[in-house]
Amino acid sequence: MTLSILAIDTSCDETSAAVTQGTTILSNIIWSQASLHAKWGGVLPSLAQRKHRQRIDWVISRALKAANKKMTDIDAVAVTVGPCLAVAGQVGIQKAKEISIKHHKPFLAVNHLEGHVLSPLALPKSKRLTKKQLPFPAFGLVVSGGHTDLVKIKQIGQYQLLATTQDDALGEALDKAARMLGLGYPGGAILEKMARKGKDNKYSLPLPMSGRESEGRFSYSGLKTAMWKLTESEKKNGFLRKSQIENLAWVFQDKAFEHLIRVIKYQIQKEPAKTLLVGGGVVANTELRKRLRQMVKELNLRVCLPYSKRLCTDNAAMIGVAAYFKAKRGEYEKEINKVERVPRLSLDQTPPWSD
């Protein structure tokens, strides 16, 4: 019988709970705080923690109801332990511990980045995961607000880091560029819309780390600085025209994605694998999806993307699916009192209490 898992994620500014059964999503409830943090231009940790505490019980109740499950039907509890905004992640961890103890349910501690990597394997009840979708070794790519990571997946649970974030992650860089253009927060999605109407011959920006793809690093700080200088030079009386904003959005997004693709292509051409699993909030970007599909076609690979853009952003369903594979390997936490948040946990690390 396939395990039914209640999964919780409070890693940043979404309060989420889900019920999964194997790789099937029975429910996935997400309550976003994005509009509450907009006036601060970013996530305010104390506000995120407070809102998670206010909403966590409601979100869990909704997830169980939507899945038509009671706690007696649940086989295990899973939660994100990192990487995360520390005070936000702690809310979910504490709640998962309470549920585990009260209802005598096994406890699974999940790496948030592993959830993103495996998010293409999370499917609705109308679809089924086949062995053809799990050919390993494979590659995994996370492109989110906090992380830009490329890994080789030897098997689920075994990750080798091929390239990682040097400074700003891709999602963070897109948000910052949007802020420079006065598009608000979170701005990546608005930047994408503006870029669709932009032209490619109006402005020029440098390609990050051109010729240095072998170093295995994604870097956006230099591009961000160049964008700021260009934007300031184009302002007339302190303002930008709509056409200027569209063209500036286009050139920034173009260079940001070109850098990403160049590093990925260099790294994966050296490794024997045929599938690329992609997750993270930036994967919702239509232009990035287009470029990834073009890249894998050139390299004779197949790309697996989340079936819904709702699974690209932070959510508990992907945590439940990652937990399912941990459960299959018997990786339950025997002493949950030792489980704590690990804000800077990387994809190729194990939590300190597991050493």
Image (tube, rainbow, N blue to C red):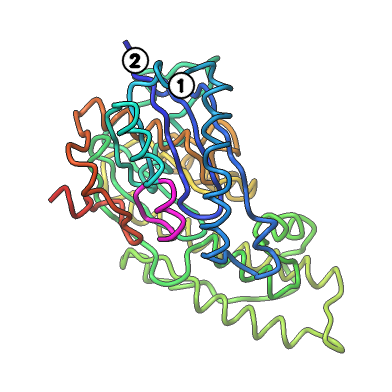
Amino acid carrying mark 2 in the image:
Thr
Q: Residue at x 56, y 76 (%)?
A: 206
The residue range painted magenta reads: 81-92
Q: Is residue 282 visible?
A: no
Residue 291 rendering spot, x and y as whole percentages: 56, 48
Amino acid carrying mark 1 in the image:
Thr
Query: Is 91 part of what is drawn in magenta?
Result: yes
Q: Which residue is mark 1?
A: 24
Q: Is residue 301 above or below residue 186?
A: above
Left or right relative to 270: residue 240? right
- Quadrant in the rendering for residue 320: top left
Mark 2 residue crowding within 10 angstroms, few (<14) / some (14–19) / many (20+): few
Residue nearer the viewer, 223 or 54: 54
Q: Residue at x 68, y 67 (%)?
A: 178
Q: Residue at x 53, y 50 (%)?
A: 52
Query: Is 301 part of what is drawn in magenta?
Result: no
Residue 2 rendering spot, x and y as whole percentages: 34, 15
Left or right relative to 113: residue 25? right
Mark 1 residue crowding within 10 angstroms, few (<14) / some (14–19) / many (20+): many
Residue nearer the viewer, 228 or 146: 146
Residue 2 is labelled as 2
Residue 151 is labelled as none
Identify the image quadrant of the N terminus.
top left
- Residue furthest to the left: 355
- Quadrant in the rendering for residue 302: top left
Q: Earlier in the sequence, mark 1 or mark 2?
A: 2
- Label 1, label 2: how many angstroms apart (C-alpha)? 10 Å
Tags 1 and 2 touching, CB below 8 Å:
yes
Residue 239 rendering spot, x and y as whole percentages: 84, 81
Secondary structure beneath dot 1 equals strand
Left or right relative to 318: residue 251? right
